[in-house]
Amino acid sequence: MALDELKVAEIAAAVAEQGLPWTASENELTALPLEERQKRLGVLVTDEELARMASETMQLASQEERQLQARVFGAPSAIDWRNIGGANYVTSVKNQGGCGSCVSFCSCAVIESAVRIKLQNPNYAIDLSEAFLQFCGGGSCSGWGLTSGLDFAKSTGTTDEACMPYQPTNMNCAASRCSDWQNRLTKISSYTGYATMTARKDAVATNGPLLAGMAVYNDFFAYSSGVYVGMKSTGLAGYHCITIVGYDDAQQCWILKNSWGAGWGDGGFVRIRYNQPDLLLDTSWQFYSVVPVISAAWHSNVTVAQAYSSHHSQNAWAYFTGLGWRKIQAGAPDGVTNMLTLLTQAVAEGRKVTVYADGDFVYQAYLS
């Protein structure tokens, strides 16, 4: 097969002949020459780095295996963060276009979902700037390292999309970002890698969508539906960053969100069979979760569904509709005991409150 011309009919015939559980079809990407398809990727990695990453993943897997012996994991057999009790914590599919910015797209996607999950609010409006992360963080349309976006999100953060709208071309950071960008940053405090299947699934179920990388072969561009099993014979196109949004043990697959627009794949998503060494996805590379930094803000007219304390007044909690559980911060201006009394009163009387809270704590509260 000539790599510069992707013959979808030949791919579909090979899929059928091998009895693979997916379908191939033509789309905007399959009509592109190889050089243009490769611009839809963007993880920069050398052979030496590939070897190092595989070695680090094996070392981490050994550590996780020892830890697993002392733990009982209760991850479900399937989870999809697009439908958790009818709620969707995954933000919309975007399109990186002809620019190797996949690292920023999957980094932002993971952070966006992490914020929604931490706030326990699937409808929370968040749209982070892939352009700011990529072009202010040191990346370019030529690509970036797999975790480079997470490193920059930790050290600096990224703005909202409106501050620096994305264009599929190398953008000048200083000239393109808004003047008040420093006041519009979303950051992460840390990110964590996972190397075993059990730890990966537990991380997806517990933390939400994860960042991952994979080797992309040319048949992948023609994916339409089903569970993808790669055909190495179609040739390696490059390496790609992609977002794990769930998994399904019945189908033995990961569920992933891509950054090639909703016209590719299954509405922009893809299912990929577990344990395919050629893809590197879950055999040689780690998956990564993030911990977002949620800035404290005022929230007006919030319903308090529950308020309680444990054995001592310094360990008190409240559940706010639309915000979720928040611990009453020890040393808060209102005092833990006084705030707990106020919140308990709000529950009993069905009154709303105005609270000053971040993703973990409530600091002040007033009856609305």
Image (tube, helix red, strand yellow):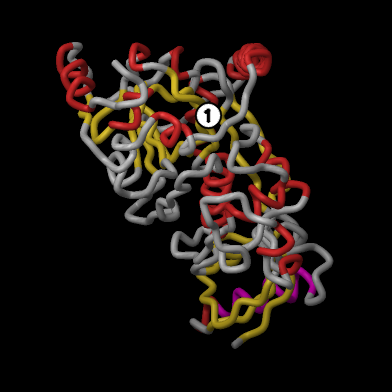
Q: Position of residue 367 (x, y in %)?
A: 62, 85
Report the residue at 34% width, 35% height from top. 270
- Amino acid type, label 1: Gly
Assess whether residue 345 is covered by the magenta stretch. yes
Q: Residue at x 47, y 29 (%)?
A: 201
Provide the residue designation for mark 1.
213
What percent of the width, then of the height, locates residue 311?
Answer: 71, 54
- 43 or 213, which is in the foreground? 43
Quadrant location of the C terminus in the rendered image:
bottom right
| Frontmost residue, 270 versus 167 | 167
Q: Secondary structure at mark 1?
A: strand
Residue, x 69% and y 61% (percent of image)?
185
Residue 317, located in which quarter of the rendered image? bottom right
Dividing the image into 4 quarters, which one contains the N terminus?
top left
Give residue 297's quadrant in the image: bottom right
Give the residues in magenta.
335-346
**Does residue 335 sit above or below 202 in this rendering?**
below
Q: Above or below — where is 244 with respect to 8?
A: below
